[in-house]
Image (spheres, rainbow, N blue to C red):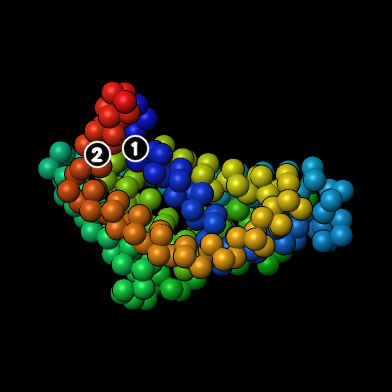
């Protein structure tokens, strides 16, 4: 059975991509990185895809590096300390959930943190890679609660920290690649999703709250195993 936190991290990446203040901007952003105008996008699918791939590799590199660092620092912690890390991680995720639902304010999450990339390189793929690394470092208010929850999961599972952050990168990266490959169709779908996106924070907040409670009570694996057993018996 796949470790449930790996699946959760992958889904969290997809959810981050679907954030209301990020999703509508993605086709135009990728076109900007590629140096392609709106009229040229239909005939430049390969270039858009390759620039999307470079962008994804950029933020995946940062997440992989962070995963290795977390694993190196926390791999030797005792069982008692790991239990406390789980409780602290659960509390952090619950706070992120309450923030996402608009029930509390966390001021540092509302400040955009990013490295400004003011120069475009002669090779657009290098520019896309650099923008990808900057995207990973710069937590926007839209995705900070989701990404922060993944980091909390990684801290509570030091041995899986690298895999969890790579899973998050895959979940975030695959939709980017699909948009780069099918830009015209993606724009149509994004435009039609506006009515659904207004419920985004409520749904994400509830899911984070459930996750935080399960992590705090150390019931996440228990619930996953129970679900797995039931699916085998059915």
Could you tell whether 199 is left or right of 231 in the image?
Answer: right
Residue 223, which numbered label? 2
- The answer to whether the residues at label 1 and label 2 have Cβ atoms under 8 Å apart is yes
Can residue 1 be seen here? yes
Marks 1 and 2, how far apart at CA: 9 Å
Place of residue 86 in the rendered image (x, y in percent of width and height, measured from the top left): 21, 48
205 or 131, which is in the foreground? Answer: 205
Placement of 192 over or under 167, stated as above or below:
below
Q: Quadrant of the N terminus?
A: top left
Can residue 139 be seen here? no
Q: Residue at x 51, y 49 (%)?
A: 14
Q: Secondary structure at mark 2?
A: helix
Q: Secondary structure at mark 1?
A: helix
Q: Quadrant of the C terminus?
A: top left
107 or 115, which is in the foreground? Answer: 107
The residue pinned by badge 1 equals: 4
Could you tell whether 32 is left or right of 80 in the image?
Answer: right
Q: Residues within 10 Å of mark 1 (few under 14, many from 20)?
A: some
Place of residue 91 in the rendered image (x, y in percent of width and height, measured from the top left): 23, 59
Place of residue 45 in the rendered image (x, y in percent of width and height, measured from the top left): 80, 45
Res 80 → quadrant = top left
């Amino acid at each position: 059975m796949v470790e449930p936190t790996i699946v959760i991290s992958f889904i969290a990446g997809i959810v981050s991509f679907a954030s209301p203040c990020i999703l509508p901007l993605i086709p135009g952003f990728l076109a900007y990185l590629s140096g392609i105008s709106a009229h040229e996008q239909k005939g430049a699918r390969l270039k858009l895809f390759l620039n999307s791939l470079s962008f994804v590799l950029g933020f995946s590199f940062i997440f992989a590096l962070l995963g290795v660092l977390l694993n190196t620092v926390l791999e030797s912690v005792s069982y008692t300390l790991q239990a406390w890390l789980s409780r602290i991680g659960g509390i952090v995720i619950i706070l992120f959930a309450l923030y996402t639902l608009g029930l509390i304010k966390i001021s540092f999450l509302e400040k955009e943190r990013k490295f400004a990339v003011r120069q475009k390189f002669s090779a657009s793929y290098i520019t896309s890679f650099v923008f990808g690394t900057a995207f990973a470092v710069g937590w926007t208010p839209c995705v900070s609660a989701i990404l922060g929850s993944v980091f909390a999961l990684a801290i509570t599972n030091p041995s899986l920290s690298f895999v969890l952050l790579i899973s998050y990168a895959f979940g975030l990266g695959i939709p980017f690649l699909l948009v780069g490959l099918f830009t015209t169709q993606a724009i149509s779908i994004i435009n039609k999703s506006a009515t659904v996106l207004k419920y985004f924070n409520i749904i994400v907040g509830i899911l984070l709250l459930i996750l935080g409670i399960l992590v705090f009570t150390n019931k996440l694996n228990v619930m996953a195993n129970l679900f797995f057993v039931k699916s085998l018996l059915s």
